[in-house]
Amino acid sequence: MSVKIFFMIFLCSASLVGFSQEKIDSILPVRGLCIAAPRPAEVAMFIDFIKKELVPARINTLILRIDYNYMYESHPELRDSDALSKNDVKKIVNVCRDNNIKIIPQIDLLGHQSWAHTPGALLRVYPEFDETPGVKYPEKYKWPNADKLYCKSYCPLHPKVHEVVFAVMDELCDVYETDTFHAGMDEVFYLGEDQCPRCSGRDKAELFAGEVTLLRNHLDQKNRHLWIWGDRLLDGKTTGLGEWEASYNNTSRAIDLIPKDVTICDWHYERADQSAVYFAMKGFNVVTCPWREPSVAVHQLEDMVRFRNSSTPEMKSRFRGIVQTQWSDATKFIDSYYGKGKEKHAQNEGSCFRALIEKMVSLDKVK
Ligand SMILES: [Zn+2]
């Protein structure tokens, strides 16, 4: 190929990329993946995946599930034994910055403070923060159980809990050089429990909203933004969405009590539920989150585009886009994406993400 022809092709493709970027941003501003942060040994592979797959697919948002997978300096006692160093994190930050991918680090707050029979780092180190200290960790976990233990929660009214929580939130936002933090806050089953001397008898919607507002206000002091999962703001019984995907413990009224600048991640895995419209009509920015069912994910993506196209300008700007979730570890997801995974669960996450990317690419081709 002559230098001249090569140069012409280069100019041509560069301008197409520029045009295309603007177009896809207007069709779907947020195109994201929510994934477990890699462990130190996985960082190189993770960066490779970002460069080879996420960048060409024009993924622009990465929610990184960190929890205690970082060598926190403010609270070293909370570090996982195999946690990312600052140097590891900077490698991820650099590749994302170079490719205009926004990183949103996540720590599960309020709920998800234990898994099966094991406390998470926060309650392991600070058991006094436990909302239900009377509920013992079972030797062998099974659901359902007499305690209705899904995951433990921390007590949002414990006088010391936010000192710790704020410190690790701030540290993550600093090291990831980001203005947005994801606090999880999904599937909070234990809240306002009778056995908690501070919370018993209190309104659960107000307790939930109080915690969201407190976290939001803390972030706002440094012009940072809060994202959360949306399930506690939906009424499980009225909608038929059940007690995971929506709330059976009277938290749903919190939707009218929290600040409107919190972004809602509206996850639905079995059907393309239309609740993004509900969140947007309440004044929230919303992204829809699929998981592992390709046909549902594609439907959700089509819905999001349709919502944007059939709304007033006020509403359109709140339908932000789509973020695929994944709940295995980073290697399993990446393996499954390349068709190498062994677990059915993980394989579906990978194929779902592929289907989503394929659909996004096709959006770009629509005139
Ligand atoms: Zn409490």
Image (cartoon, grey):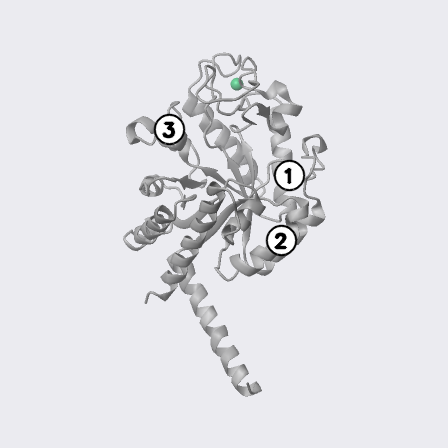
Inter-mark Cα distance, 1 to 2: 17 Å
Among the 4 quarters of the image, the one containing residue 114: top right
Question: Earlier along the polypeptide chain: callout 3 or callout 1?
Answer: 1
Q: Amino acid at mark 2?
A: Met
- Mark 3 secondary-structure assignment: helix
How packed is label 1: few (under 14 Cα within 10 Å), some, or many (20 or more)?
many
Tell me whether circle 1 and circle 2 mark residues in contact (CB < 8 Å): no
14 with respect to 280 (left or right): right
Q: Amino acid at mark 3?
A: Ser
Q: Amino acid at mark 1?
A: Asn
Residue in view at x 52 percent, y 58 percent: 53
Across and down, in percent, residue 295 comes to 35, 48
- Residue under numbered circle 2: 45
- Residue under numbered circle 1: 69
Among the 4 quarters of the image, the one containing residue 19: bottom left
- Residue under numbered circle 3: 252
How packed is label 2: few (under 14 Cα within 10 Å), some, or many (20 or more)?
some
Above or below — where is 194 with respect to 348?
above
- Mark 1 secondary-structure assignment: loop
Mark 1: C-beta under 8 Å from nearest atom of ligand 1: no
Disc number lying in front (1 or 2): 2
